[in-house]
C-alpha cells in the first residue's frame, strides 16, 4: 500500500500514513488533536482544516460547512478527507482542541480515558452483536433501551402458547435476562402487530432490576431506527447529543440556554423562585421545553422520527435533576441541605413531558448530595476515576465548584459556592463563552493582546479570558499579591472608575459597543473570591483525605466556564494546584460524556449508581479549616506561595 | 374453667365446650359447618342460628341482621355468641354449609385446605410482624402491598442524606428487599410529607422483581388503614372481597352480575362482539364499572376510604382477564387458540380505570391457555394441589368446564365447552342460582318435592336443581338409560309439549308466574350434552395421564353452577367420577379464594405464576378419543356403567 507524508502546520509535525487514511487519523497519529463533536461522522463541522499544499477530493456533504471563500482556499473537514498524495495541512485555531466548544466533550479526554486508562469493565460484552469499533466504548454495550429483531414461529395447535410466551422464548435465545415482562401499553396492540407482521417483529426492551421489560413491539425489522439522547442539563446551558443506539455513534449535537434563566441566574435563585412566590411547574416546563426543542431540532436535521428515540440519559446538578422530574428542591437550599432523592427511578417518558417515544425511558443520573449532582457523578464516570488505583481529582468549575478526589477504594467530594464570576457573572464586562467574548489575554510591555470567540470585536470577557487577564495583570505587577491594583504603578490603562480603580482591557474604538471594556477592583475581588473558594475546597478536601497535591496523579478540570482553559495561567492565579502541568487535563463537558456512557451502557449506568453511593460528601461548612484556607487563597497565587505554588514565577 | 354442653339440631350432634367459647367454634368442633363469608367477624350475617333451649347474651351489632320476629325467636349470629350455659341450637337450612352463597368461598374448603392439607410454604414468614392467628394463611403473609410505619431520625448536617436514602435506611431494618426504588409520583410530594409529619411516616410498598417499590408515603402511622380487594371476575358474576391487609381478615364481600352480559351470554359471544362490530372499549368499561361499583359499595358500607385500598388481585378466565386490561381477545377464539399473554404485569391502578388508590397496584392472576384462565390457577392454588405428592383433581364447572389433574410433580389441564345448561341457560325453565330457583328435587312415588332458594314459589330451576331432577327422573325410571322419557311409563306429569314430551316439575298453582314449570326432552338433551362434555373431559385427561379414577385422592368441585351441589346425585347422573364420596369435595368459589391468597401473600402469587407455567394444557380437539368418550357419556350415568359407575344403583 502506498504511503504519503502529511505535514501539519503551524506545528510542523509530519507523519507518514497509508493511502486513503483520513486526515483526522493522520492528525491524531501526529499528536495534533482536532476539534470534533460528532466522533468523525462529518456532521458537526468542527474539524476544519486548510490544505495548503497538495490536492484532496472534497466530500460533497461537507460543502455546507464552508463559505465560498473558504472552499476556494481549500478548506475541508479532516474527518471526511482521505489522503491521496503528500500534503501540507494548516490547522486553523478554531479547529484546535484547546478551543473546543462548551457543548462538546473534549476529544482529548475521549482519547485519554479510553485509550490510556484501563477500560471500563463490561461484564457481559457480547449480549448484543454489533459492528465493533476498536477502542470505542460503544462497541461493548447494552444501551438503556435495546432493540431485538425476532422471527417467531407461527403458532399451531401443537404450539399455541400466548404471544408473550412466544416472544420471550425467542428472546431467551438472544438475551440473558432472568425474567421478562411485557408492559401493559405494549400488550395492548401486540395481538394485531405480531399477526400483521407475520410474526416478524422488533422488540424494544429496557432493563428493570435484572428483568427484561418489553416496552414496545414494532412490525418487521426496525433495528436500524434506534436512537437515544444524552443530555447535560446545566444551570446555564443545556446540551443534547443524538446517538445511534445500533452503532453507539453520536450523530448530532445541539445546545441551548436554559430557559429557567429568566427566573434566576443560579441554582439558589431558582430554588428561591420555586419555593417563594413562583412555582415548580413553571421551571419544570421551562427545562422540558429546552430539551424538547433540542430533540426536535436534532430529529429534524438528522431526518429521524421522534418515535424512534426510545431512551434518554440526563446528567444535571441535584437541583436541575429535581426540577426536571417535578420534585420540590426547597430543602436543598436550607441547612442541613437535604435533597429529596439521589437515585432517580427510570421514568416513562410520557410521565415527564419529554417528547421521545411515549413508551421510552428517561433515566436521570444519580446524585450524591444537594450540591454534588448527577453531572459530577457523570464526570467521575467519564474520567474513569472510580476504577483506578491511583488517586485522581475532578474539578468541575461552574457557579458551584464541585471537587472529587479518590480512587478505586475511596472517594470524597465537596462543593464550594464559587459564584458566577467564571461563567460571566459578578463582573461588569463578564459574559458567557459565546461570540465576541475575550477568551485569551496577554499583556506585554503595557500592550494588551486578546482573542475573542469568533474573531470579532470584543463584547465582554468570559471565564477563561478572566483567568488569563488576572494572570497577566499579576505577572506584569499591575496587581499586587493581594490582588489589589498596584498603587505605585503608572499605566494609562489604570483609571479611576465609579467604584475605585479600573484597568482598561479594550478601548472604545476596539469594542463592538464602542464602550471602554474594563476590569474594576470590585470585579477582581469577585473573581478572587471565586478562585479562592475553589482552591480552598480542593485544599480542604485534600487535607481531609490526608493527601498532598503531589499525590494526585491527575487533575481533571471540567466545566462550563469557557471553551478554552490555559492551564498554566489557571495554576498561576492559584485556581488549580501547582502540580506538573501534564498531569492537569481539561476535559470539557464531562457531564455530557458520562450521560452518553450511561445511555449506551446499562453497566455504565450501574457504575454511576455505585459511584453515587460510594462517594462521601464533605460539607465544607462544617470543615473548620475551610475558612482559613479560603482567606489564605485570596492572594495571587496564594499567601503560602513558597510551599503551595513553588513553580509560579512572576 | 366451666364446661357446657351444646346440642346442634337437626343433626342432634352434642359437644362440650369451655365457657365463653363461640357458638361457631362449638359447631365446628361438633362437625357442623356453618355458612360464613367474613371469617367470623360478624359482618356477613351468614351464620344465623336459633337458640331453642337455654339463654345467650346477644351482641348488639348483630341485631340488624334479623327481623323483629327472628329476634323474638332467639335468632343470633353463631360467630358473635359465646356459650354461657348448656344450649340447644337449631341450624336453619340457609346457614348450613351446603347452601352457601355462590359469592363466597366454601368454609369447608377453607377448613380442609388449611387444617388438613400441608400448609403452603412461606419462605420468609417473619418479614412483617403481625397478630398471628393460628392455622390461618393470613398470619404468614406479605400482601401485594405492604405498609410500614417509620420514625426517621431528623436530618442534621452530619447526617444529611437524601430523604429517600433516609427512608430506605430505616426500611432495611424492617424488610429484606435487595434494593428499593421510590416511584416518581411518590417522590413528587415526599419533600413536604416527611417534614410536615416530623419524619413520622408510613410507606406503602409493592414488590417489583425482588425490589421494594415505594408507591406512597403518608404522614403519621396509617398502618391501621390498609386494605386490598380480591376479585373473581366470572363471565356471569363478579365478586369482590374487601380484605384488611393489616390482619388478613375479610371484612366485606359483594357481588354483582357482569355488565358485559348484555353484549353476549358467554365468552365466545363476547369475543364475537369485540372482534365484530362491537368494541373492546365497551366491554372493558362494563367490567371496570362492575368492579368499581363493588368497591364503592364495600368502602361505603364498611366506612373506609377508597384511597386506603392499595392493591387488588383479580382472577378470571383468560378472556375476562384480557378484556379487563384492554387486551384484544380475538385470537383466543380462533384455531390455534392463542391468547396475547399469560403472565399479566402488575398494573398501576390508574392505568386500568379501577378506583382504588391511584398509586395502587392491580395484579391479574396468570392464566395457562386460551380456555384455562387465572380462575383455574387460583383454584389450583386454593386447593393446594401443586404442593402435594398425592394426585388430585379440580373440576370447575361453568359454561366452560375446566379440569386440572396433577400433583407436585406434574399437572395437566383441559377445558371443555359445556354450554350454559348448569348455569341456567339452554333449558326453558333454567335460571341462575338466585331467589326462586329450585335447587333441590326429590321424586318419591310420583310426587315431586323441591326446595327453592329463599323458600319462595319457584320461578325456575338452577344447575343443582337440574342435576337433582335428572337424577330423580332416572332413579324413578322416568328417564331411560339413554336419557329419553320412558315410553312405557304412565305418569300424569309426562305430557306432550310443543317439541315432544315434557315432565311437569311444578303445576301452575305452585309457581310464581302461574305457568307450568316443565323439563322437556330438548332441555334434557342439552343438560346431557353438558354433563357428557365435562365427564368426557375428566375421563380423557385421566386417560392422557394414564390414571384410573381410583388414583385420584381427591376431586375438588368448584364453580358457579349453584350454591349447593348434591355430590351423590352429581355422580349418579355421570357428571362426576364414581369414587368414594368423601373424596369429592365441593369447594365453592375457589377462584375468589385463590385471588385472596395472592392478595395476601406475594409468595402465593409467585406460586400461582409457577402453577401457570408448570401446567401442561391438552387441547381436547386434538385428543382423538375425546369424541368417543363424549358419545359414551350421553347416558345415565354412562354407557359403561358397570366399569365406570359401579356404585350407582337405580
Image (spheres, coloured by chain):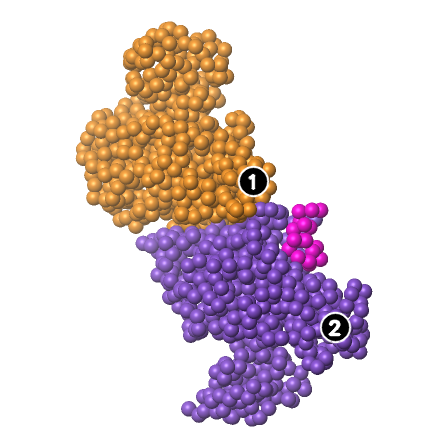
Chain colours: A orange, B purple
Q: How many marks?
A: 2
Chain to which the residue tagged by mark 2 belongs: B
Q: Is residue B534 above or below residue A253?
A: below
* Residue at x-position 53% and y-position 79%: B33
Give how far apart the Cα atoms at labels 2 and 1 are: 61 Å
Is A108 in front, or is B574?
A: B574
The residue singled out by tag 1 in the image is A194
Q: From which residue to which does the magenta span run?
A: B261-277
* Residue at x-position 46% and y-position 55%: B614
Is B559 in front, or is A242?
A: B559
Q: Quadrant of the C terminus of chain A?
A: top left
Tag of residue B488: 2
In the rendered image, which quarter is residue B502 located in? bottom right
Instruction: Say which element carries label 2.
Output: loop
Is B37 in front, or is A357?
A: B37
Chain to which the residue tagged by mark 1 belongs: A
> Counting other residues with Cα less than 10 Å from the Cα at mark 1, is it few (<14), some (14-19), or many (20 or more)?
many
In the rendered image, which quarter is residue B152 located in? bottom left
Is the Cβ of the residue at disc 2 closer than 8 Å to that at disc 1?
no
Amino acid at each position: 500500500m502506498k504511503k504519503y507524508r502529511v505535514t501539519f502546520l503551524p506545528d510542523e509535525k509530519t507523519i507518514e500514513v497509508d493511502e486513503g487514511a483520513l486526515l483526522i487519523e493522520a492528525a491524531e497519529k501526529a499528536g495534533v488533536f482536532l476539534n470534533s463533536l460528532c466522533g468523525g461522522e462529518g456532521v458537526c463541522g468542527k474539524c476544519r482544516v486548510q490544505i495548503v499544499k497538495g490536492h484532496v477530493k472534497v466530500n460533497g456533504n461537507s460543502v455546507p460547512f464552508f463559505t465560498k471563500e473558504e472552499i476556494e482556499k481549500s478548506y475541508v473537514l479532516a474527518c471526511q478527507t482521505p489522503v491521496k498524495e503528500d500534503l501540507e495541512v494548516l490547522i486553523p485555531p478554531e479547529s484546535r482542541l484547546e478551543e473546543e466548544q462548551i457543548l462538546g466533550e473534549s476529544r482529548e479526554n475521549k482519547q485519554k480515558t479510553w485509550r490510556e486508562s484501563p477500560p471500563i469493565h463490561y461484564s457481559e460484552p457480547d449480549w448484543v452483536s454489533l459492528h465493533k469499533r476498536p477502542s470505542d466504548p460503544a462497541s461493548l454495550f447494552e444501551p438503556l433501551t435495546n432493540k431485538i429483531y425476532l422471527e417467531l414461529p407461527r403458532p399451531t395447535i401443537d404450539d399455541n402458547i400466548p404471544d408473550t410466551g412466544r416472544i420471550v422464548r425467542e428472546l431467551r435465545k438472544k438475551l440473558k435476562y432472568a425474567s421478562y415482562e411485557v408492559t401493559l401499553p405494549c400488550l395492548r396492540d401486540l395481538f394485531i402487530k405480531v399477526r400483521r407482521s407475520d410474526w416478524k417483529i422488533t422488540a424494544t426492551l429496557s432493563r428493570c432490576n435484572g428483568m427484561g421489560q418489553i416496552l414496545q413491539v414494532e412490525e418487521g425489522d426496525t433495528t436500524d431506527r434506534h436512537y437515544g439522547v444524552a443530555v447535560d442539563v446545566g444551570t446555564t446551558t443545556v446540551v443534547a447529543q443524538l446517538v445511534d443506539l445500533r452503532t453507539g455513534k453520536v450523530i448530532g449535537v445541539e445546545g441551548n440556554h436554559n430557559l429557567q434563566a429568566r427566573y434566576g441566574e443560579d441554582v439558589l435563585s431558582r430554588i428561591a423562585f420555586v419555593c417563594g412566590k413562583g412555582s415548580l411547574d413553571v421551571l419544570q416546563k421551562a427545562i422540558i421545553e429546552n430539551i424538547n426543542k433540542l430533540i426536535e431540532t436534532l430529529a429534524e436535521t438528522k431526518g429521524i422520527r421522534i418515535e424512534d428515540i426510545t431512551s434518554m440519559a440526563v446528567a444535571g446538578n441535584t437541583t436541575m435533576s429535581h426540577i426536571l422530574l417535578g420534585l420540590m428542591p426547597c430543602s436543598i437550599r436550607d441547612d442541613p441541605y437535604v435533597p429529596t432523592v439521589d437515585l432517580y427511578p427510570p421514568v416513562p417518558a410520557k410521565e415527564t413531558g419529554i417528547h421521545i417515544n411515549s413508551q421510552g425511558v428517561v433515566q436521570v443520573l444519580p446524585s450524591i448530595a444537594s450540591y454534588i449532582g448527577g453531572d459530577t457523578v457523570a464526570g467521575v464516570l467519564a474520567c474513569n476515576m472510580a476504577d483506578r488505583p491511583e488517586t485522581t481529582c475532578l474539578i468541575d468549575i461552574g457557579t458551584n465548584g464541585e471537587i472529587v478526589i479518590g480512587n478505586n477504594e475511596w472517594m470524597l467530594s465537596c462543593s464550594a459556592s464559587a459564584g458566577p464570576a467564571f461563567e460571566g457573572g459578578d463582573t461588569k464586562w463578564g459574559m458567557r463563552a459565546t461570540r465576541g467574548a475575550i477568551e485569551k489575554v496577554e499583556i506585554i510591555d503595557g500592550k494588551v493582546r486578546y482573542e475573542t470567540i469568533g474573531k470579532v470585536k470584543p463584547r465582554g470577557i468570559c471565564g477563561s479570558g478572566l483567568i488569563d487577564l488576572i494572570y497577566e495583570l499579576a505577572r506584569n505587577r499591575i496587581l499586587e499579591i493581594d490582588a489589589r491594583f498596584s498603587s505605585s504603578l503608572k499605566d494609562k490603562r489604570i483609571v479611576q472608575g465609579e467604584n475605585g480603580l479600573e484597568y482598561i482591557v479594550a478601548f472604545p474604538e476596539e469594542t463592538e459597543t464602542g464602550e471602554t471594556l474594563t476590569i474594576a477592583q470590585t470585579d477582581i475581588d469577585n473573581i478572587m473570591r471565586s478562585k479562592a473558594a475553589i482552591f480552598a475546597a480542593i485544599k480542604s478536601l485534600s487535607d481531609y483525605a490526608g493527601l498532598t497535591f503531589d499525590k494526585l496523579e491527575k487533575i481533571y478540570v471540567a466545566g462550563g466556564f469557557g471553551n478554552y482553559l490555559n492551564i498554566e495561567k489557571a495554576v498561576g492565579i492559584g485556581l488549580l494546584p501547582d502540580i506538573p502541568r501534564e498531569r492537569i487535563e481539561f476535559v470539557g463537558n464531562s457531564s455530557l460524556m458520562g450521560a452518553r456512557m450511561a445511555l449506551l451502557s446499562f453497566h455504565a449506568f450501574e457504575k454511576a449508581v455505585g459511584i453515587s453511593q460510594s462517594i462521601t460528601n464533605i460539607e465544607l461548612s462544617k470543615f473548620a479549616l475551610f475558612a482559613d484556607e479560603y482567606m489564605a487563597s485570596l492572594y495571587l497565587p496564594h499567601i503560602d506561595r513558597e510551599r503551595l505554588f513553588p513553580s509560579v514565577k512572576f
